[in-house]
C-alpha cells in the first residue's frame, strides 16, 4: 500500500507558502507517497445544492482559502523532491480542456513527471453556472475532455473533433514528462462515475462508501472495463478514510493500492506531529 495525504484546508493554510510548503516537506520526510488537493473556483453564498458527503449538505469550508490546485501543485513541486502531486479532485467540465491540458503538461514537465490528475464532474450547480458552464451536460463534457486532453498530450499535431471541443493540428507543448501521459483518476462513486472509470480512467478514486458498497462499486468498474476491452487490473484504485491499520488492510485485500488520509492539525506544528504519528502507525507498517 502507498499512502497519500490531504493537507488542511482551514483558514489560510493552503495559501501560506510557509505552512503548505512546510507541510508537504514534512509529508515527504514522513514517507508519504503523494499529496492531494481539491478544487472550488468559487463557492457561492447561500448555495442550494447539497454537498453529498455531509448529512447537513454543506461543505464547511466556504470561507477558507482554496487556491487553484494546479498552481498550488506547481509550487509544491518546487519545494519537494519526489512527492507525487495529485488533484483530488479537479472539476474538469468547468475548464477548457485545451488550457487544462497545457497547464497539466507544464506541471508534469516541471515536476519531472509527478502529476496525478484526479478529476470529477462537480456537485455544486451554482459554481458551474458562475464559471459559465452548464451543470446538466457536465458528464458528457468530462468524457469528451478526457479524450481531447490525451490527444493533446500524445500527438505532435493534435486533431480532435467533438461536440464541445474542436481543434486541427493544434501543436501543444511541452508534452508531459510521463511518456504515457498524465494518469487520470476518475473521482466519485455514482453509477456514471464508475462507468467513466471503467471506460476511460487510469485510476478510480471514490469517497464516502461503506465497505460493502465499495466492493460492489469496484466490481462494477471492473465489469465496465472488461466490456470495453480493457484490463480491469490496470485501473489503479485510490481510496481514503480510516487511519486504522486493520481497516486499511481490508481494502488492500480488495485491490486498493493507494490510501489517502486527511492529516489536519490545528496549525503547521500539530499537523507535522500528526504526520509523524501516522508515519509510525500506518505508513511504515503497511508500505
Image: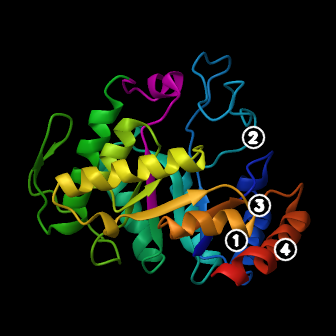
Tell me if mark 4 has few (under 14), some (14-19) or many (20+) residues whose alpha carbon lies within 10 angstroms of its own. Answer: few
Q: CA distance from mark 4 to mark 2?
A: 26 Å
**Can you say whether 191 is above or below 235 in the image?**
above
Q: CA distance from mark 4 to mark 3?
A: 10 Å
Which quadrant of the figure contains the C terminus?
bottom right
| Res. 206 visible in picture | no
User: Which mark's residue is nearer the viewer, 1 or 4?
Assistant: 4
- Residue at the spot of label 2: 64
Q: Which mark is residue 277?
A: 4
Residue in view at x 22 percent, y 57 percent: 226
Residue in view at x 34 percent, y 59 percent: 102
In x, y percent, where is residue 90? 48, 48
Which quadrant of the figure contains the N terminus?
bottom right
User: Which mark's residue is nearer the viewer, 4 or 2?
Assistant: 4
Q: Is residue 190 magenta?
A: no
Q: CA distance from mark 3 to mark 1?
A: 11 Å
Q: Is residue 126 magenta?
A: yes
The magenta span reads: 117-135
- Residue at the spot of label 1: 24
Q: Which mark is residue 213?
A: none
- Label tally: 4
- First of labels 2, 1 by sequence position: 1
Amino acid at each position: 500500500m502507498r499512502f497519500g495525504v490531504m493537507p488542511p484546508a482551514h483558514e489560510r493554510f493552503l495559501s501560506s507558502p510557509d505552512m503548505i510548503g512546510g507541510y508537504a516537506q514534512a509529508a515527504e520526510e514522513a514517507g508519504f507517497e503523494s499529496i492531494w488537493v481539491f478544487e472550488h473556483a468559487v463557492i457561492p453564498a447561500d448555495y442550494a445544492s447539497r454537498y453529498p458527503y455531509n448529512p447537513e449538505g454543506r461543505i464547511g469550508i466556504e470561507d477558507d482559502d482554496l487556491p487553484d490546485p494546479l498552481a498550488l501543485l506547481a509550487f509544491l513541486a518546487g519545494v519537494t523532491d519526489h512527492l507525487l502531486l495529485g488533484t483530488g479532485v479537479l472539476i474538469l467540465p468547468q475548464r477548457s480542456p485545451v488550457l487544462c491540458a497545457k497547464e497539466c503538461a507544464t506541471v508534469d514537465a516541471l515536476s519531472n513527471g509527478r502529476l496525478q490528475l484526479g478529476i470529477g464532474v462537480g456537485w455544486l450547480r451554482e459554481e458551474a453556472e458562475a464559471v459559465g458552464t452548464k451543470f446538466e451536460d457536465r458528464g458528457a463534457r468530462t468524457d469528451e475532455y478526457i479524450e481531447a486532453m490525451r490527444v493533446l498530450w500524445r500527438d505532435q499535431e493534435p486533431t480532435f473533433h467533438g461536440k464541445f471541443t474542436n481543434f486541427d493540428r493544434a501543436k501543444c507543448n511541452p508534452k508531459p514528462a510521463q511518456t504515457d501521459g498524465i494518469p487520470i483518476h476518475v473521482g466519485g462513486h455514482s453509477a456514471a462515475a464508475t462507468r467513466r472509470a471503467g471506460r476511460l480512467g487510469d485510476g478510480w478514486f471514490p469517497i464516502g462508501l461503506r465497505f460493502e458498497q465499495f466492493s460492489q462499486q469496484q466490481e462494477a468498474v471492473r465489469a465496465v472495463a472488461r466490456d470495453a476491452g480493457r484490463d480491469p487490473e490496470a485501473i489503479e484504485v485510490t481510496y481514503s478514510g480510516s487511519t486504522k491499520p486493520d481497516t486499511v488492510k481490508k481494502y488492500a485485500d480488495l485491490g486498493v493500492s493507494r490510501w489517502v488520509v486527511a492529516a489536519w492539525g490545528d496549525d503547521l506544528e500539530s499537523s507535522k506531529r500528526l504526520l509523524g504519528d501516522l508515519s509510525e502507525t500506518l505508513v511504515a507498517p503497511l508500505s
